Image (cartoon, coloured by chain):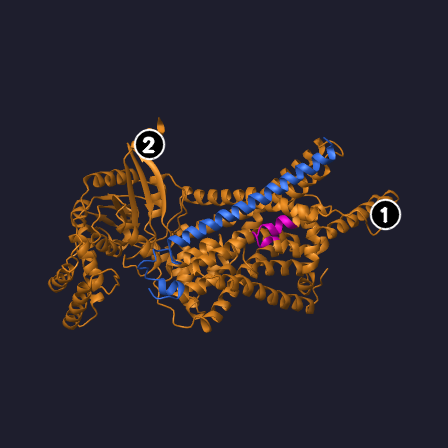
Chain colours: A orange, B blue
Amino acid sequence: MGGKDKAKRPRLVVLLAGNPNSGKSSLFNWMAGAHQHVGNYPGVTVEKKSARFVRGDVEIELVDLPGVYSLLAASPEEAIARDEILSGAAGVVIQVVDATNLERNLHLTAQLAEMGVPTVYALNMSDEAASHGLTFDLELMSALLGGPVVPTNGSNGEGADALLAAAQRVAAGGQACSSRVNYGLDLESAIAAVAEQFEGDDAVSARRRAIALLDGLSDPHAPAGAREAAAREAARLEKRGGRPLDVQIAEARYGFALGVATEATRESSPHVRHARTLRLDNLLLHRIWGLPIFVFLMWGVFNLVFALGEPPMQWIEAGLGGLAARILAVWPAGAAPLLQSLVVDGIIGGVGGVISFLPNILLLFLAIAFLEDTGYMARVAFLMDRAMHKMGLHGKSFIPMLIGLGCTVPAILATRTLEHKRDRFTTILVAPFVSCGARMTIYALLIPAFFAPRWRGWVLWGVYVAGILAAVLVARLLRGTLFRGESAPFVMELPPYRLPTLRSVGIHMWDRAWMYLQKAGTVILAISILLWALGTFPRRTEFSRDYAAAIAAAPAPEAAAALEAARQAETLEYSAIGRIGKGLEPVLRPLGFDWRVGTALVGAFAAKEVFVAQMGIVFSLGGADEGPERLRAALRKNYTPLQGLAMMLFCLLSAPCVATIAATKRETNSWGWALGMLLGMTAIAWIVTFVVVRLGLALGWGLA
Amino acid sequence: MNAHWADWIAVGLAVAGAALWLALRIRRNWKKQQEARARSCACLTPCDGCPFSKDCDGKGS
């Protein structure tokens, strides 16, 4: 019955378009009750996202398009947005307009008007604009733009419902946006001359395609007559205007934007505007102090991750230890020893080890979400712009790198905001050097295992900086060899400072926790079971000595424990994983790694967290108890701080996980680049780790 | 049934289940990627008239 009702329900596709960082994703979340990631910097949404819900008796599909400044299709996300608007599937387009930057946002409006689709305008961040002393004449603005204007607030959802209601009303009316840019007498006559060549098109489509041709965009399906007319008119107007035609068209659009903004804005107290932002920028974007402040902030964040993360981590560890003890206590003595080992050593030792680090991961992402939402991270991109150019990277490359702090896969997708292939490919190839959240799990295990509390923040900070340095050096190398050429200029949008809302930070944290637990409960669980089997079979029946007799005759419990550990080590070496590790040992020995680390590094290729799971399984099967603190004690017993540092460096620089390789293949459309990344990063990791270990040895730091 | 064999069967099922689940997941992801590839070019816009086809795969648009 319900299904029948659903089938009868009218359906409405609503597109959410707007400039980057205009608050589209926040409004999307409010309207659709979704939990999409939002950030206070441009370029967070690089693919369209959609959500379905019912409002009244209409089933609404709300589509969040990538943020764009224009619809000229000069970059992949512009092409996605343009194609979606032109596909004809949408009943209405909502353009989200940042009220604090009205003029710039209305440039997109000028192009949207040419698409001939019903449009509603969300005047977002109107509260913030009011705090800057700006008020708007909404009625006049609606009249000028040719569609309803609804004031909204992305941070608390104000106006979201009214916006949807307006969108439904406009869609029901089916009226296309009545606004139109007046390009002036000369240009309008040229547009008309070209448009009449598009015989099969309606008036709106013919005008849009004519403007596009005059703007210099290619239209492979345009009739030859239209192309000839466009070339002729362009030559005429360029001669008359004394400047390129695309510049004249852009000027007309900016004229429209400026006109609407000036007409509809009432700036009551201009001096209030941006005063707070300017004061903060004077400090945070300072030529000398800007970067040191960023470095200090990150150092503080890394210290907090360990200082605040340790107690909850110990609670989880105690819980897992208690669970293992409880299972062992209720397990009938001698019954199903293999299954018992699978549950206690394989699952609790592997998956439990990964789950224990959830507090550290969450704290790191809480800090990053806070810095993003306040608008500070966009300032960091600005600060880094000049440095990035010197190093061969595009200024915009910093955004994918920021996203890479969470996960490298979306970071690689985020490179679509880069227009040129050389910038995109360079950024794709170096993005995996930035430490992702999964690698943080490895650092959270190893740093407290080998370094005193006062050094932990410094070491973690050093590892992150090492990753960024590696990215920069490799980018420089790539830009000097494979991807020669100047970087395109870049204007970084600096959003106003905002106090993050609890909801936004909460959504970010919840998403991160859920993703982490989901991965632990699925992929990591399956891999842990397989790694446990590889560490258990084939089973050794003959040993180098009669351990049973030796343990029985041991004079003290310590001696018996040592004999038991030696027996388990022999068992593990005999297993499949032991043989794989032994096979890798000649390559890894110069780096100070034994076969156990080798097996964990192989597992880490599936997902970086598996390194921790595998070390947990290896030492659990080898006799150590479950739990990170016990695992850390076992690591301290078997390795030195230099080896711990080498492990972190190798994990940081070596081949990224298989998902990253797949994303690279997809985005570059080439297995060559994906495999080149895999081999190149592994070679770099080996060389750098080797040099660091040799330097450490020369300085008197030993290997176990 | 012999307890020894029950232990082996339980563990065997768990390991086979994990391997099968991973294999199916890899296959599903692979198929998804192939489908996405069939729909779009590397820059994820329709290849017909894709302004980036030259930049994406080296061929002219």
Q: Nearer the viewer, mark 1 or mark 2?
A: 2
Q: Residues within 10 Å of mark 2 (few under 14, many from 20)?
A: some
Q: What residue is pinned by disc 2? A: A6
**Stretch of the chain drawn in magenta:** A603-614
- The amino acid type of the residue labelled 2 equals Lys
Are the residues under badges 1 and 2 in a single subunit?
yes
Q: Quadrant of the C terminus of chain A?
A: bottom right
Q: Residues within 10 Å of mark 1 (few under 14, many from 20)?
A: few
Residue at (49% x, 53% y) in the render: A407
Q: Nearer the viewer, residue A231 or A605?
A: A231
- The amino acid type of the residue labelled 1 equals Asp
Which quadrant holds residue A692?
bottom right
The local secondary structure at tag 2 comes to helix
Residue A259 horizontal/vertical position (percent): 17, 56
Residue A169 forms part of the magenta stretch: no
Whether residue A493 is visible: no
Residue A181 horizontal/vertical position (percent): 17, 56
Q: What residue is pinned by disc 1? A: A546
